[in-house]
Amino acid sequence: MSDMITADLVDLDLSADTKEAAARALAERMVAQGRVTDLEGFLADVAAREAQMPTGLDGGIGIPHCRSTHVTEPSLAFGRSATGVDFGAADGPADLIFLIAAPAGADDAHLTILSSLARQLMNAEFTAALRTADDAETAAALIRGDEAPSAEPGAQGAAASAGDEAPGDAAPEGETGAEGAEGAAQGTGGTFMDTAAAPAAASAGAAAGSGTAANPPTAAATGSGSGAGTASASGERRFRIVAVTSCPTGIAHTYMAAESLENAGRAAGVELVVETQGSAGFTRLDPAVIAAADGVIFAHDVPVRDKDRFAGKPTVDVGVKAGITRPAELIAEARQKAARGEASAPAHASAGTPVERAGDSTEGYGTKLRKWLMSGVSYMVPFVAAGGLLIALGFAIGGYGVKNAPSVMDHFLWSQAESWGALLFQIGGVAFGFLVPVLAGYIAYGMADRPGLVPGFVGGMIASTINAGFLGGLAAGLLAGGVVMAIQRFDVPAAMRGIMPVVVIPLISTAIVGFLMFVVIGKPIATAQKGLTDWLSGLTGTNAVLLGALLGLMMCFDLGGPVNKVAYTFATAGIAVANPSDSAMQIMAAVMAAGMVPPLAMALATTVRGRLFTRTERENGKAAWVLGASFISEGAIPFAAADPLRVIPSAMVGGALTGALSMAFGATLRAPHGGIFVVPLIGNPFLYLVAVAAGVCVSTALVVVLKGMRKQAPGSPADDPAPDPATAPEGTRQPIAA
């Protein structure tokens, strides 16, 4: 850690009174040392991490941290506050503040060292020594590990008292005597030691005397070092626990929770092995260790990877901070659940559906429904893009007559452009034939996992056969998923469970979905689909312009989110046929034009009024030119995230104008994607580009005006390419605007 912190990165008289001011003061030291390139960009990343979960810990510790593209090398700054700074800890303000900065692509070795610091923070002697350090160099040496903690008598007494409550706290990086030898052996292998190995470990510990064991690995599965695997005084096997810790950044809380649980395990006399799923990667616990465990503790704020491994055991599932602040309670709860015989669902039942694995299985029905539909749409969109572009290229090469060309299997001349155009058109047509089945199949997949695929695809194909179209695909997917979920609720004999997902569920669910689609709901849906198509085909004049404005608003509302996807899917569904109507192609043109507006407008705004934007935003603006031109609305997300109340309304106004103008001009588009690169395939291309330019100019003007209404202090970081951190103005722009 010698290259991570120096005396120049230590402030023993930190005068900040808020966590934002404390982070700024320490970050300015990093900027002065050339370790951070953009102060505001880095602080925005710190604030974003802080918004996920407070970084204050009991015991007077604050650990703001993040991974950022503005960090040149892994760095650590330390500040000591006499009055304390509130970082959200339950026991009050923090007087020891560590700002951890990791590059976005930090290597595993440096992240492992940072995780070691996180473990040291659980050592009462270490923190006591920092509170009594007389100068910055001494504090830096303590943090680097160059100098052993040597607290004042009073502090040593406090550390000893803390050690009485949680034996082993005084040496989290390596234990003394038998405990140290056992902890090192267990940590290295990540296994519970056999009872017979205890005497050997004790002998090794005796030989070691009062020396400490080597630091256990922190990025791998580590053991508690609490005499793991040894028998208790009564000769009974000790209670065994496996734990997983993880946090959003994977730098600090992950390893602090592991250390805290290990210390509490030693105090409680249980065998405890921790798998840390941090930024430095993770090593899976040995399956034999998991099988031998009596209980499981999950202390995490991000989904546990490969959670199915722990199914069927008594499980305590909490946030990562609980693993730091109340580990003894978690261990006691795990023992109580084991004593009551409580266990999590077996692997086949606990795995959950793809939607549940991607989020919280306790989400409301409305949220799950949206995710189910988006699951189908996300799998369908590549088919739309590939098929639509191939069809559009077919028309461009062979003319519109290719739609009446014979099959290229029967007639294909290598030297004729019309044959190549027909080939591309027919390949695209085959790709389009998958749209509704894929949509339905993957909606069912999102609901019921792989058993939903067969009835979903079959239901989607039936929807295509009976001309129920996009609406039929939605209904078929939801039906298939619901039927499979209902069948899975039945308790079947153990002898039949093996054939359920392969034979029984596909057979029964496909028969039910097929019956419903052909006989019950298929015809009404087909009628509704035809009515919708006829309505769209009949839109002219004011109605068409209003529809274009509405679609433009939707495309710019959440920039690639659910509302944006609804508008895009609505448009692509209209052209996903062999002969789409002119109105359907006009809708596709309006949707793509509106979707190009937000990133292009932000790019133009950063060019004409760069002083209103941070250096990071100006850099993002350069990329937004290409993203906007390619019809990637997400290019405006960094701007919207930093200033949503100014950026999003501005984008929506411009998008609505572009959508309305595109419909008014009668521009058409057969390709579902491509941006300016498919302009040759657009009907009325000049007026189409005029509509895009008009929306971009309006959005740019609005965002410039709205941002200009804020009071800009002269010499703000946006104006000054290299501001002096010590004189940063009070008007400095914050990452999230009010």
Image (cartoon, grey):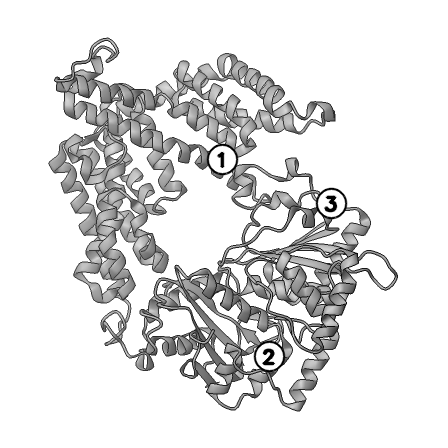
Where does the image place residue 315, in percent across and percent down from the top left?
70, 50
Judging depth in this view, the residue of 723 and 223 nearest the camera is 223
Residue drawn at x 55%, y 42% is 357
First reached walking from the N terminus: tag 2 or tag 1: 2
Instruction: Spot the residue most to the top.
Output: 410
Q: Residues within 10 Å of mark 1 (few under 14, many from 20)?
A: many
Is there a contact, CB below 8 Å, between mark 2 and mark 3?
Answer: no
**Quadrant in which residue 497 is drawn:** top right
SS at mark 1? helix
The residue tagged with tag 2: helix, strand or loop?
A: helix
Question: In the figure, 231 relative to 415: above or below?
Answer: below
Q: CA distance from mark 2 to mark 3?
A: 39 Å
Mark 2 or 3, nearer chain start: 2
Mark 2 burial class by Cα count in 10 Å: few <14, some 14-19, many 20+: many
**Pointer 2 residue:** 126
Residue 706 visible (yes or no): no
Q: Which residue is mark 3?
A: 343
> Circle 1 sits on which residue?
372
